[in-house]
Amino acid sequence: MKIGFIGLGNMGAPMAANLVAAGHAVTGFDLTAPCPDGVSKAASAAECATAQDVVITMLPNGAILRSVAAEIVPAMQAGAGFVDCSTVDVESARAVADDAVAAGLLPVDAPGSGGIGGAAGGPLTFMAGGSDAAFAKADPLFDIMGQKAVHCGASGAGQAAKICNNMILGVTMIGTCEAFALADKLGLDRQKMFDVVSTSSGYSWSMNAYCPAPGIGPQSPADNDYKPGFAAELMLKDLRLSQQAAETVDAATPLGQHATDLYKTFVEDEDGLGMDFSAMLPRFEKKSR
Ligand code: NAD
């Protein structure tokens, strides 16, 4: 396929490189980041999007997605796929999809879960929202950029799934970290704590796959001085999106709100900026009741 790729940052660059490696003709555009090997550089987003079978965007937020979409939608050929893999608010995803459909395009919102390691290594999971025809157009590319894609429903459903997933992740990571800090104070050995919880009803991805305690469980950012991984500020971004969405539909999410507040304090007032989101554990270690 002829593919335009806009937003070649931490996530976008390895995804574009994987598409090149699979034999696709990829043209890229980014305001600052260089094009990975094998990706030809366009002079503008509109040029990048012109005459492509599919255009993929991987951008920081909904406002930037909306402005890039306003530029590229008129430039794209009718019937082309428009796959936005950024994590953005549900409203922006739906607004951009509406404009794309009106222009005869096939839009899919498809945020990924799996992080930087995921984008480079392939095991990203995409959660997709859009029509059956739009999903079918994009689906072969998801196989190349990640391990699988779940078609979650109409436009916006991919973003909805992503923020619900990451709200659970933020809450379980905080729960896991505060439990480790409590266990420490109770004199419980961390390895014993892991051995019990990882095979008991307290288990979760945060404990079993991404254990926040250094030297315990599988390799994780905790074993690398809490270098991300998945940065605390990105978790804060996703938690804020979850609360913004909850507000819009009047959903009660008290733990999601509390997790948002804790990550906000951690990132903005403590030393969490630039740390992995599992660095909540050393934070709790320093706190008293
Ligand atoms: P990043 O900041 O590394 O990359 C974003 C890129 O977009 C940058 O290179 C920037 O120059 C470019 N950009 C910004 N405005 C642009 C414009 N108008 N035109 C062209 N390019 C523009 O961010 P990232 O880590 O690659 O994340 C991208 C998206 O993926 C975000 O929405 C993020 O929330 C989501 N995400 C990130 C992770 C992660 O672990 N990094 C995991 C899952 C999802």
Image (spheres, grey):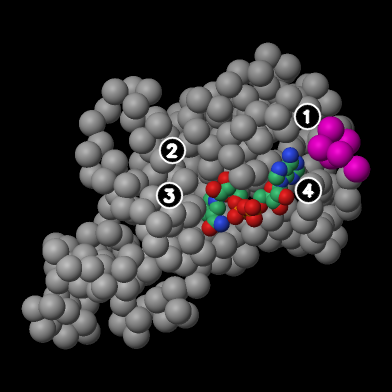
Report how far apart the C-alphas of labels 1 and 4 lie in the structure.
13 Å
> Looking at the figure, which quarter contains the N terminus?
top right
Q: Which amino acid does label 1 sit on?
A: Ile
Dot 3 and dot 1 residues touching (CB under 8 Å): no
Mark 2 surroundings: few (<14), some (14-19) or many (≥20) residues within 10 A: many
Cβ of mark 4 under 8 Å from ligand 1: the answer is yes
Report how far apart the C-alphas of labels 2 and 4 lie in the structure.
24 Å
> Looking at the figure, which quarter contains the C terminus?
bottom left
Mark 4, residue position: 30
* Residue 81 vertical placement versus 176 (above, below): above
Query: Tag 1, which secondary structure?
Result: helix
Question: Residue 279 location, x and y as percent?
Answer: 37, 68
Dot 2 and dot 4 residues touching (CB under 8 Å): no
Mark 3 surroundings: few (<14), some (14-19) or many (≥20) residues within 10 A: many
Q: Earlier in the sequence, mark 2 or mark 1?
A: 1
Q: Which of marks 1 and 4 is nearer the N terminus?
A: 4
Left-right relation of 126 to 236? right
Inspect the magenta stretch and tell me whether residue 289 lies in it: no
Q: What residue type is labelled 3?
A: Leu
Mark 2, residue position: 241
- The residue under the point 62% across, 25% down is 96
Q: Tell me the tag on residue 72.
A: 1
- The residue under the point 21% across, 82% down is 190
Dot 2 and dot 3 residues touching (CB under 8 Å): no
* Residue 188 vertical placement versus 129 (above, below): below
State which region is magenta: 43-48
Name the one closer to the observer, 150 or 218.
218
